[in-house]
Amino acid sequence: EAEAAAEAEAEEEKRWLELAEQQRELDRQRQMEEQRKLEELSRRRELEFARLQKEEEMKREADERKALEIFEMERQMELKEQAKLREAEMLRELELARQKEIERLMQQQQEQERMSLS
């Protein structure tokens, strides 16, 4: 009877050791699965961060291009305005020269008339 009890106790202990080993294996598998999930989450976050960075960079580049376009348009408008001002100044100078020539011709004509009268 003592031998049967010892044998039953040994079987019980063996079952408990097997259960403990199964539990350790389950814990190890659960821990590996959690680690895999954390790594996957980390990878997704890195990809999302990289995507957002790229998006921000593209937006910044588009903004810079737009600013350059606006700057160039303003520069072209300024150049056109300067050309108009130069043209207007030239026209004023031509008009002044024309007026001076008319005055010179009128004075010349008056002098000729005086000369012919005397």
Image (cartoon, helix red, strand yellow):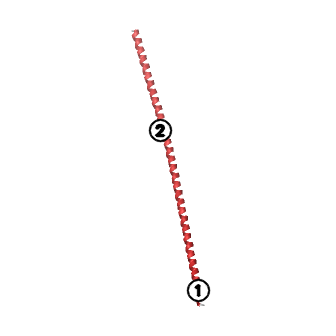
Label 1's element? helix
Label 2's element? helix
Residue 32 appears left or right of 117: right
Residue 79, x across and y down, in percent: 47, 35
Q: Of residues 85 and 76, which is closer to you in this image? A: 76
For image coordinates 50% across by 42% down, the residue present is: 69
Of the two numbered discs 1 and 2 on the same chain, state the one appearing first in sequence. 1
Question: Circle 2: is it few (<14), some (14-19), or many (20+) Cα within 10 Å?
Answer: few
Residue 20, x across and y down, in percent: 56, 77
Give the vertical position of 103 relative to 77 (above or below). Answer: above
Question: Circle 1: is it few (<14), some (14-19), or many (20+) Cα within 10 Å?
Answer: few
Quarter of the figure with residue 23: bottom right
For image coordinates 55% across by 74% down, the residue present is: 24
Which residue is disc 1 drawn over?
Answer: 7
Residue 10, x across and y down, in percent: 57, 84
For image coordinates 50% across by 51% down, the residue present is: 57
Residue 77, x across and y down, in percent: 49, 36
For discs 1 and 2, the disc positioned in front in the rendered view: 1
Q: Of residues 10 and 31, which is closer to you in this image? A: 10
Identify residue type, mark 1: Glu
Quarter of the figure with residue 109: top left
For image coordinates 54% across by 64% down, the residue present is: 38
Q: Are marks 1 and 2 in contact (CB under 8 Å)?
A: no
Identify residue type, mark 2: Arg
Q: Please state the total of marks drawn on the protein image.
A: 2
Give the vertical position of 48 relative to 102 (above or below). Answer: below
Quadrant location of the C terminus in the rendered image: top left
Residue 51 is labelled as none
Quadrant location of the N terminus in the rendered image: bottom right
Which residue is disc 2 drawn over?
Answer: 75
Q: From this viewpoint, which residue is outermost toward the bottom? A: 1
CA–CA distance in space, label 1 to label 2: 101 Å
